[in-house]
Image: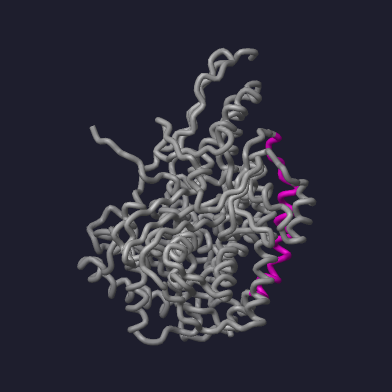
Amino acid sequence: MANPSFRVDVHHVTRVEGHGNIVVDVQNGVLKQCDLEIVETPRFFEAMLKGRPYAEASHISSRICGICAVGHATASLRATEKALGVEPSEQTVLLRKLNFHGEILDSHVLHTYMLVAPDALGVGSVIPLAKTAPDVVLRALRMKKLAGDLCAAICGRHTHPIALTVGGFSHYPTTAVLQELRDRLVAVRADVDATVELFQKLKLPAFERDTEYIALHKDDEYCFIDGKLVSTDGGEWPIEKYREVTNEFLVPHSTAKRTKNQRPSYMVGALARFNVNFAQLHPRAKEAARALNLSPKCVNPYLNTVAQVVEIVHSVEDSIELADRLLKTGVTWRSPVQPPKLTGEGVGACEVPRGTLFHNYVIQDGWISGANCIIPTGQNLQNIELDMRALVPTILGKSQPEITLDLEMLVRAYDPCISCSTHMLNVRFE
Amino acid sequence: MSTVPPAPTLVLALGNPDRGDDGVGQAVLQDLAQRGDLPAHVEVLDGGLAGFETCLLLQCRRMALIVDAAELGLAPGEWRSVEVGESLLAQGIRPEGLHAAGLNEALQLAAALDTLPERVTVFGVQPQSIEWGLGLSQPVAQAVPAVGAAIQERILHDKDGYSDGEDPDHR
């Protein structure tokens, strides 16, 4: 087939969160259309926040996502704390970091094992995978359970945190609980090593397209909370200048906004963090990256999943170190720091599993008067679509089911959370 | 991980009490608690919105009694108990969850992993409403004691043993 003509129409990509369609139209070997349609209903969370007291913001906005609930709550708290001049204590910062690792682990294990591994192992979903490789699936469930228990111990429950508050916590883990978690994290190293071994064996497509990679960065740690925005194309921005980086725009076939910075698109997420922050990874995570043949700057988007495996190693190791620090100093009850003022504007930013998340609030007399949330998947959509446009011409010789699978795997590699990326659109009813 | 083996019989409630009648499982657990002490071989758990992790809760059990709201096409408050077998697993037990995997996916995964208990019974109660809000509708609230009694009956007359509360394998 020198000049093939075909149409790929995947109505709702499976094994992603939310509803998105892939539409590709090739006529006589020429790509006529290549769209990632986002058809999820907008959810208007920013509008829900307006008029609510500041203390409710993290609880409302954590409902944006059942997977990144801790991430949304943390970004929300940081936005509020910056608006109201609250400086959290070192204990609060350490506990939030530990909590964050629980969520990163939970989400990355779900994506790498349940959503991507079936493709790479040639089965349709996790159910047939359980029949052929039960040890792999049970390992994933064990790791997810630990991640969930870690979150529950720190923030009060597995998802939708209740103990995270402006200026601190409303609940603290006991020493015994923290010690047990620490011991389980050490014990899970065997499962983590087995995860690295598994992904050494898995074959992912060898497709490369250089793009701009953006992530939060700190010089002294692999950054998940706060920091500054850094691009692999050069450039640094304080997180308050996030609009200069995201430059949101609309396309007709998507209910989610798109973003671009110094190129027509950019990528956020595990691979972007890996490319920007490799130097700050834990030594064991760097070792895992070497074993997985992953080195910065990696421009194969399919390897976002492999970067997630590297982050699984990092999160387990950093969690052990954080638990050790907390056990050494002892976790003590402290009332949350009270805001010295009730009016102001602040931006909170975190690296949630799928990339950089921004919450920006304007607060007047304790009430939220304006809110803007920019979610990682929204920032990745334009990059996914440009990847698809670059990929299709290189795989025209494949059968249509193979082309469809390659495209679905590409979308899944970004671990998109489509429901979360739809926000603040003008919807006209006719 | 705990090294203590799990209790052979599990009573598991699933659902979100913030969504009206989806809290029927929790209400049945409260009803069971009021009926007095259960035998030592029985563990009662509120699984909330446990997704695939439900597999781990079922692992190494002999019997599981799961109570949940279920779209059965019946009048609100009517309920059925069904033994989980191959045909039911293929047919599906409840609609997909919002973010996480549902009970059906978890049971299918447990079956594939060969970790399903010998006997799994799902007590499904037809909800009137699972819209956001606390509290059960009247017909579902009225069904709770009957479901609780049926579960108690099943535990106390578990034909394969343990009916006196003694379990030689579980200490």
Where is residue A370? Give x, y as percent: 35, 54
Q: Residue at x 36, y 64 (%)?
A: A343
Name the residue nearer the viewer: A227 or B84: A227
Magenta extent: A182-206
Answer whether residue A126 is visible to the viewer in this image: no
Image: A87 above or below A236: below
In the rendered structure, the answer to whether residue B63 lies left or right of residue A291 reads: left
Quarter of the figure with residue B112: bottom right
Image: A158 above or below A354: below
Answer whether residue A321 is visible to the viewer in this image: yes
Q: Residue furthest left?
A: B138
Q: Residue at x 41, y 66 (%)?
A: B14
- The colour scheme is one colour
Name the residue nearer the viewer: B118 or A391: A391
Q: Main secondary structure of the magenta part?
A: helix
Image: A1 above or below B19: above
A198 drawn magenta:
yes
Name the residue nearer the viewer: B133 or B147: B133
Where is residue A69? Give x, y as percent: 47, 60
Q: Residue at x 32, y 55 (%)?
A: A48
A4 drawn magenta:
no
Name the residue nearer the viewer: B107 or A400: A400
